[in-house]
Image (cartoon, grey):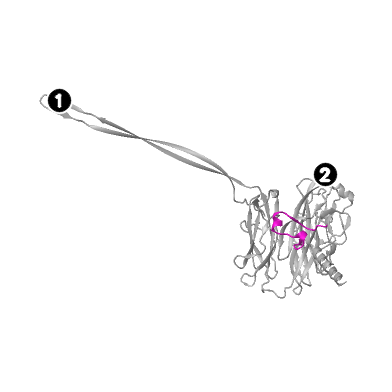
Amino acid sequence: MTVQFLFLIFSIHINSIHCAHFRGGAITWRPESNQNSVLNTDRNIIIEQRYAWSKSTAASACTTATILSFGTIGENVVSIIQCYSPAVKCTSAMYTTVSTLVPCTDYNIVLGTSYGYSSTTRNLTAISSGIVVGYVVSGAWLTLQLGGGGWDLMMYINMRPRSDNQLINSSPVSDISLVTYVPVGGIGPTSIDIPMSDADGDNIECRFSLASNTLGGIVVDECGGVCQPVALPALTQLISNNNTCTLIVTLPTVGYYAVAVQLEDYMVNSTTPLSSVPLQFLLLAYDASNPVSTCTVPPTITSIPPDFPAEGATITVQVNFPYKAMVIAQTGCPLDPDLSISNFITASPPGMLKSNLPFVLVAPSYAINLTWTPTIDQLNQTYQFCAIAIDIDYHESSQYCFFIFVGPQTTTTTTTSTTTTTTTTTTTSTTTSTTTTTTTSTASTTSTTSTSTTTTSATTSTTTSTTTTTTSKCSLRTLRFSD
């Protein structure tokens, strides 16, 4: 009996570790091109997903080899975004499931987290009422201080023509990191800005995801086990105003908390959302009562050489050619010797490698290296890179993001002209001798008159021109910056 009891406890423990691996995600959609939308006509849309998972779980383990091979991570048991609208709508829209297994793009050994991103094209038929699709799994979130268990990420897609320009709508997006550090109570509420943007320039609002909400004409659960007020303290606020979204929260204990919100876009003076997309991320509450340093100023990402892109700018790199860069951050109090940068959280293009841990340049500056050789499959694609620096007391910098466009390899034609001069010298010598002899009867006189030598030199020059044309691969990246 004792052996059986111990075995039961062991089995439950292993199952808990295996299941507690989801750490948040976001799903968005946009048209592939700026074609006019026509009802009952097929158009391509792009569904983008990003997720965070526990690095210690086999299905979501990520290494350098995983990134270089574009290996996928995720949940193996349920790994699809499926349609939850009535079957007739799903069929009319010609929706087919999308895999939620995504290529691993980053891993963070400090947080024990793997991150992945994918972009999937689907050809759908535009119908007037749209469809609701979602990623629903009965378990299991990372172990949380409040809530947990299963997750539901629900998205509303409506491809009908926009009333202002007859195009297909694009959903709002947010590039917030999927984990944010928050100090445990005692110092007042923490305010967290959730960045939002919309390609169409629509009004954007955020709200807490709901356990029961009417979306696209059907009632759905938008948040599973992390709905508010279950997953966050009761006094937590989410304020949406003038295209901004702010979370105000006080966390009582050290550990992880989950935030589940929906981002929605609206036409001016309309109360009907054009789309609704899920965003779920973690808050990591830390003990701020015994800091290493007295400095409370967060670090700053100061530069990203060699291109030094401004935030939000776009640079161009070459396909099949190595791109190397460095992310440099500085501590908030440069004169404090106790302060250092302990971690960088990144969101990278597929295939890009980063340093595992920061290294010191010259204190107070720390850095990580980036290395990436874009593949032919990434040609003409634009990717976003984002980074956050974390200091030893868990203060985090503002997120620094820029875009990278993968262009073709640039070739340079070099023309080399070579001029060869050949000189030929010809020497001609002419000798003239004149002898005059005079004879008389009484005397003999011999007279030799002048001997002259004439030398003539002629020089002939021959010029030969040789032109060599060499085509070589350019080793310089073409940079394109935009605000």
Q: Residue furthest top?
A: 441
Q: Position of residue 32 (x, y in %)?
A: 76, 48
Which residue does the numbered mark 1 point to in the structure image?
A: 439
Nearer to me, 247 or 272: 247
Position of residue 462 relative to residue 388, above or below, is above
Quote the CA–CA distance across marks 2 and 1.
Answer: 130 Å
Which residue does the numbered mark 2 point to in the structure image?
A: 41
Q: Position of residue 364 (x, y in %)?
A: 62, 68
Which residue is depicted at the point 47% across and 37% down? 464
> Comparing marks 2 and 1, which lies closer to the viewer?
1
Q: Position of residue 477 (x, y in %)?
A: 62, 51
Secondary structure at numbered mark 1: strand
Secondary structure at numbered mark 2: loop
Circle 1 Cα neighbour tier, 10 Å, few/some/many (<14 / 14–19 / ≥20): few
Q: Tags 2 and 1 in contact by the CB under 8 Å rule?
A: no
Position of residue 30 relative to residue 300, above or below, is above
User: In the image, is 469 to the left or to the right of 384?
Assistant: left
User: In the image, is 359 to the left or to the right of 3?
Assistant: left
Residue 434 image-quadrant placement: top left
Nearer to me, 99 or 328: 99
The boundaries of the magenta stretch are 52-77
Residue 422 image-quadrant placement: top left
User: In the image, is 413 to the left or to the right of 443?
Assistant: right
Q: Amino acid at mark 2?
A: Thr
Nearer to me, 168 or 155: 155
In the rendered image, residue 71 lying in the magenta stretch gets the answer yes
Q: Position of residue 210 (x, y in %)?
A: 85, 62
Q: Is residue 344 visible?
A: yes
Circle 2 Cα neighbour tier, 10 Å, few/some/many (<14 / 14–19 / ≥20): some
> Quadrant location of the N terminus?
bottom right
Q: Amino acid at mark 1?
A: Thr
In the rendered image, residue 334 lying in the magenta stretch gets the answer no
